Image (cartoon, rainbow, N blue to C red):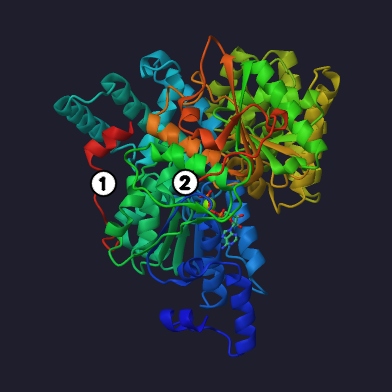
Amino acid sequence: MSKFNEMNGLTVHTADPSARAERMAAILDGLTPTQAEAAMLQGAVLVLAGAGTGKTRTLTAGVASRIALRGVPPARILAVTFTNKAAKEMADRIRGMLVGESVPSWVGTFHGLGARQLRIEPEVAALRPGFDILDADDSKRLVKRTLKAMNVSPEDAGDGSDPLKQLCNRIGKFKDNLITPDEAPARVEAMIAQAKATHGTIDPIGMRLAARIYIEYQRRLREANAADFGDLLLWPTKTMQRDEAYRRRWADRFDCILADEYQDVCYVQYAWLRLLAADHGEIFVVGDDDQSVYSFRGADITFIRRFEHDFPSSRQVRLEDNFRSTGHILAAANAVIAQDKKRLGKTLRTTKAVGEPIEVVGFHNAEGEAAGIAAEIRRRGSAGVSWDQIAVLYRSNHMSRGIEEALMRSRVPYVIVGDVGFYQRAEIKDALALLRLAARPDDFQSDEAFRRVCNTPPRGIGPKALEEIHLEAAFRGVSLLQSVETAKLPPKARVAILSFVDAIRSVGRNDTGTLADQISLLLDRTGYREMLRASRAEETEDRMENLQELVTLAGSFHNAADLLDHAALASAAPGEATEGRVQLMTLHKGKGLEFPHVFLPGWDASTFPSTYGDHDEERRLAYVALTRGMQRVSITHVEYRRGFTRPSCFIDDIPAANRVMGWLHSQSMKSPRPVGISSRAFAELDTLELLRRF
Ligand code: ATP
Ligand code: MG
């Protein structure tokens, strides 16, 4: 161990050698020498290694060692990853390695940390303190209203099958590529010219319109004192580029920057990290170019390949031992990714036994497939596998429904880990809208919340009455809720909505109760709970339970603003229990995670590779899928799904020696065959690169 000490010139901040040894052991024990060495390296470090080689583990050891051994104050470390689940996992692992020190508070997702930076200095985005964060749904609604106000029909805005979605994507891409509204028109013109010159494809009308709408949409966001997800990093990053004093203020806060899953950063994330690390060059990133699966969102593999160029004095570390998967699984994954001709290529060998071959099971149709998976899961449950050791990973969200139903019928408890999580449920959004109104009834930024709940339960506020309220609000220059008092409304509607406003205001004024009490009171006084109770819909019970869960959750927040922020950024309830449940999620959500038993449905040509995706990226996704499995991986496919189909080409890429047809338990099992920056301001993206991303 003293070797690391000398090598890195460590200033270990404890005089007691035995205490130091204990700390070191807590952090580095169980790591390989290469991992331990990497964790302790100073300066710019890139750990570029395959799946399951301990990249995340090395990164967390890196954080802990900086605190406990190098004496870096936890508050001066920033560590970032992509999903809330991964961020929580990261914080837990760090906590587990530290004795007596606190976990850094700047551990989180890109969105979450960007939001924090923006909260501290909101004026860089022309926002005021206390701004709202709109989730993807709310921002889509605002885009729609912007179109209406500009007299543009969504059909004029794009050439895809869902033009509104396409428009939102384009606005998101401007932001992910660090293009502000005032820059957008010129950048679009440059892209169009570039496309012409290089015979590239572009939708000039749709793109020009997107740039125009972007400007108006952003104006409306500001007016409502709201930020969308893209704003959370766009404005801090843009301002760091433009304003050196601001950049220094932020860069000076942190002594080191660490990022997991670096292969999936998009331009704005990349620029944000670089600008923060520009002065000290203490940047530790880990990633695997074979697992890059977000190019459709602007992620770019070239950023990881460019790391050495960005930080010329950087050190690169390779890890080659996979600690996760057994032999057959790893051999299958290696064979699938080997077909990607453009990859850099790396060695990956298992440290585990050869294990079981991959099962490939065919079904007639999707229903049969779901039932087959559920039955097999039940069977493994009876054989002693606990539910939470099992995951089902599918290509796209809609596939969860059939599997859910089959699991329900088989009485297997499950949880969906994913986008449409707790906070996206209608009743939760309604309750939070009530809370927002109560907290800030007279703010314009509460208008969206008002629109959401003013007629739930029905109070006679149809489109016409709402239009009237809008006109009154515009005329008086007040919030929608405030304008209700004087708006010309039919008498019955007027009585109903005034009593609603009264309930909101009286709960909002009363600040003696807890946040939980407030939510509960709002649900009662506005008739929301009563409405649910009276409905005989099948999901009523679920919805009541969800509301109860929200009330309980509210207990851990100081005030309404904290809870509202958290809800906008979280995809699932913090305590969403995965214990004792089979986990269902998309392949994308499964990145970085691992499970002893993995089921991969939909490996047929109709579904995977997806015809919408880039073929290489789909292949990398197959690699991610296979490498989630620790002991057992089971692939299923169907003959018929919206038409006849055939097994996925990725199945053919798995060597015959590593797979069997049908469930293992039904084989006449013979033993399986053996397996063999320093520049701180850098140029904007060039137009050709930009064109590639749209
Ligand atoms: P991915 O590419 O999927 O993100 P990763 O490279 O980040 O994977 P980890 O999740 O850090 O890999 O580690 C994979 C598994 O291997 C974990 O269960 C981890 O605890 C274990 N592991 C990592 N390093 C070692 C080691 N030196 N000895 C034993 N187990 C290890
Ligand atoms: Mg990882």
Q: Is residue 397 above or below residue 174?
A: above
Q: What amino acid type should be assigned to the residue bearing mark 1?
A: Glu
Q: Quadrant of residue 601?
A: top right
Q: CA distance from mark 2 to mark 1?
A: 19 Å
Image point 16% across, 28% down: which residue?
198
Image point 75% across, 26% down: which residue?
375
Residue 510 appears anywhere in the view = no
Q: Residue 28, position in %: x, y?
A: 57, 71
Tell me whether circle 2 and circle 1 mark residues in contact (CB < 8 Å).
no
Which residue lies under the disc numbered 1? 684
Q: In this orientation, which residue lies closer to the viewer: 179 or 629? A: 629
Q: Residue 373, position in %: x, y?
A: 69, 27
Q: Is residue 150 left or right of residue 602?
A: left
Mark drawn on residue 541: none
Instruction: Tell me if mark 2 has few (under 14), some (14-19) or many (20+) residues whose alpha carbon lies within 10 angstroms of its own.
Output: many
Q: In this orientation, which residue lies closer to the viewer: 665 or 602? A: 665
Q: Is residue 468 above or below residue 397?
A: above
Residue 180 appears anywhere in the view = yes
Mark 2 or 1, which is nearer the eye?
Answer: 1
Q: In this orientation, which residue lies closer to the viewer: 490 or 98? A: 98
Q: Is residue 250 above or below residue 271?
A: below
Q: In this orientation, which residue lies closer to the viewer: 330 or 236? A: 330
Which residue lies under the disc numbered 2? 232
Disc 1 secondary structure class: loop
Q: Quadrant of residue 149?
A: top left
User: Which residue of the protein is positioned furthest toward the front in this rendering?
Assistant: 670
Q: Quadrant of residue 335?
A: top left
N-terminal label among 2 and 1: 2
